Amino acid sequence: MQKKNIVLTKPFSIENESDSDVSYRAPNLLRRLLSLLKNVRRGSDLTRFQLPPQFNFPKSQLQCYGESIYSISSNLLSRCNNGHSPLDRLISVVAWSISTTRPPIFGVAPYNPTLGETHHVSKGNLNVLLEQVSHHPPVSALHATDEKENIEIIWFHYPVPKFNGTNVEAEVHGKRQLKVLNHGETYEMNSPNLFIRILPIPGVDWVGNVNIRCLETGLMAELCFKTQSFLGLSGNQRLIKGKIIDSSSSKILFEVNGHWDSTVTIKDMKNAESRVIYDAKEAISGLQAPIVKDEQNVWPTESTLIWSELSQAIMSQDWEKATEAKKFVEEKQRDLLRERESKRETWVPKHFTLCQNKEGCWECLPIQKLVPNSPITTL
């Protein structure tokens, strides 16, 4: 059998900024980025904006989403199930939600997933499956199940990046659900926005409000992700603040404070005692790339197959080859689109249903109850 060319790279981890591969960084970064954006109008939607490969790192956006679920050193998901009380479990869900926030790299971005592209990885009993269910808008859907812990995650979203003159902010639409089935609890939450500051001092961060609510207990958390000041000089980088509330009484039970890339604590409002609920160094450092255990059963739609030639070219800094490889993938997608249009066919996702609700927002639901084991695994 012909060997498949599968390229897997290390996930983002908390030490990412100090040890990231130099091949992830474009030469003359700020000057080249400004030249790309010089003809883009303020307030423009950048959803269809295409980056040359010098501004990509060797990974699809689907892989980045998946890594935030399966690439973790600690057992935060298990704690969501094993908490003795609804409040204990909500606090664990807050910590897990923060753990999905990974340090981005300024000036480089993942590939825009192709329509129908998938990413499928297993970690122990946790099986994670993602599919790009729409291209315009770019909707990504995730389904993860852990039969041992009896946990299910459904996560779909679509970013809408806009250029604001000195920065780009990608507002992330969509919803996450974490279902702790042993306790009959469903936790709903949204995602922070990605903020890319170009001037005066380049940087990238997560910003905005995240609300986490348990539909059955009425317990909720309100979190605010804050970036540094406009000049980039503030010491309070990657700050997170918030509170945990009993919505039935509007009583504040805990205050949340810290930095999502270091430690986050909660303070009990009854006795003023504080404790750490999340340690980024413990949770998302020392992460390793997944490995392929069964090459022949890797789906042809797998991200690591679709983009393998481009990823290899970027890692070897062969920009001519990278340009050709990216063009090949994009042209193939255009050919498939023209073929569907000529046959008047509508593309349908394989693993999810996709629809718009009454408010015009996109929603996704998994077709299968359980995600199968993957031939790609991680520790």
Image (tube, rainbow, N blue to C red):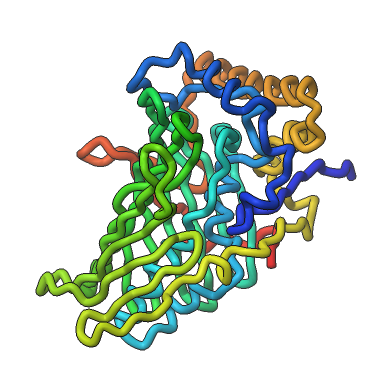
Q: Is residue 117 left or right of residue 169?
A: right
Observer able to see residue 329: no
View extreme (right): residue: 1
Would you place residue 280 above or below residue 198 in this image?
Answer: below
Q: Residue at x 55, y 16 (%)?
A: 35
Which quarter of the figure has residue 177? bottom left
View extreme (top): residue: 39
Q: Residue at x 66, y 59 (%)?
A: 374
Which quarter of the figure has residue 242? bottom left
Quadrant of the drawing holding the C terminus: bottom right
Whole-percent x and y of residue 115?
54, 33
Observer able to see residue 238: yes
**Foreground of the two, 295 or 55:** 55
Q: Is residue 218 left or right of residue 19?
A: left
Whole-percent x and y of residue 246?
18, 73
Would you place residue 89 above or below residue 297 in this image?
Answer: below
**Foreground of the two, 23 or 336:** 23
Quadrant of the drawing holding the N terminus: top right
Q: Residue at x 71, y 22 (%)?
A: 328
Q: Is residue 330 left or right of residue 182?
A: right
